[in-house]
Image: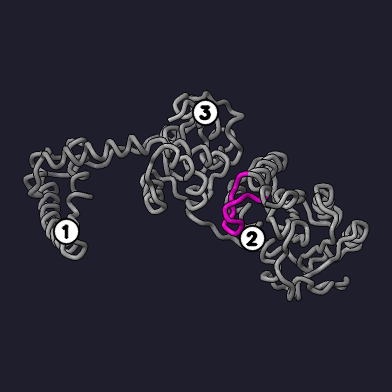
Amino acid sequence: MDKLDTVKVKRTQKDYTLGFKLAVVDSVEKGDMTYKQAQAIYGIQGRSTVLVWLRKHGKLDWIHPPKSQRMPHKETPAQTIKRLERELADAKAHNLILGKIIEVFDGEHGASVKKKVCYGILWQLKIDKQISLAQGCRLLDVSPQAVYQHRIRQHDKANKLAVIKDWVQTYRMLMPRIGGRKLYWLIKPKLIAHGIKVGRDGFFDYLRAHRLLVNPRRSYTKTTFSKHWMKKHPNLTKDVPAPVKPEQILVADITYVTSKQGTHYLSLVTDAYSRQIMGYHLSESMPASEVVKALEMAVDRRCYTHKTIHHSDRGLQYCASEYQEALRVNKITPSMTDGYDCYQNALAERVNGILKNEFLLYECTTMSELKQLIDESVCIYNNVRPHLSLDMRTPAQVHGSYLCPA
């Protein structure tokens, strides 16, 4: 293990992105973990760091928490006897079912469930002082020596894999909802360098055991109004092959985002070849004068001079004279979908989904705070997040590699 992995680095508030802070606050307020558990899981330094985030970004009152519930009513001796009799009968039935399940697993899978599961359960019950190890081994017909040997193997394996958690947390600070496959791709070189043999399935098991998996989110709101009198352009990308170089086709779309101040609108212009976000702009409404600012940013960031097609839906903002004039001045050919068909602008919709489902997860307090979060998210999306469709390269790598092809 190299020196960088062994030395503990002191972090400040600037080391945590706004998206990471909002992710921790949301998890704590949902009850997925306490603020102390959040500090331990994500390696957050400082006793009151998470509490400060909860007071600043949370929706609950963390200054005056609710009083604890009163003690339950004490049951009578007769009620106690009935409850114990019922629990004893349930326990016998439960043990019978579990015994049959273990027999089926041992018979069908050719491997003893006791070695993989029961030993760990017996040890945990011993730690919790619910039953003694000797009693548990006698009931399951296993030897205490086997349990201790299993414990030693698990302990050695956990120590060897402990460094993986630090690597995952480092990337999750930047991308709170990055998927497991992309995480494995980013971490795999480090696994090889440290001699850790963990496959993709084993890596997913590790993430699951340490509560580091993320659940997908889906949401949809229509922001396009295409039934207007303005001129609509034909779809120039419908029957042509996929782009073979950056800035050959630019795709544009508008999506909504919210803060505590209300609903805002994010305009995006993305390169269809490299998937790099070329231009973006956040506004409180959707006039063409605001949407065109994303196009102007994309034009300023262009690196090539070949012909370019601008593809979008048939929204009135893109059909407006101000937007069309900006395309004409910059010698960009307009292209639009045939009616309201989101699949004809699928790439732009996909980029919207990535930003909203992986980065813009939590409600900011103000529009300026939301803009900061968007700036951070676009930078990480372009320069850090690998894409499956780009052979696990980042959009910036693909966009820049065309300058010096291999």
**Scheme of image coloration:** one colour
Query: Would you name the residue on which mark 1 appears?
Result: 102
Q: Amino acid at mark 1?
A: Ile
Q: Is residue 53 left or right of residue 210?
A: right
Q: Position of residue 398 (x, y in %)?
A: 67, 52
SS assignment for the magenta stretch, majority: loop
Report crowding for label 1: few under 14, some 14 to 19, many 20 or more residues within 10 A (C-alpha): some
Say above or below: 57 vs 312.
above
Boundaries of the magenta span: 384-395
Tell me the quarter of the picture where residue 323 sits: bottom right
Query: Would you name the residue on which mark 3 appears?
Result: 49
For the residues labelled 2 and 1, the Cα–Cα distance comes to 45 Å
Report crowding for label 3: few under 14, some 14 to 19, many 20 or more residues within 10 A (C-alpha): some
Task: Give the label on residue 350, or none.
Answer: 2
Q: Amino acid at mark 3?
A: Thr
Closer to us: 145 or 79:
145
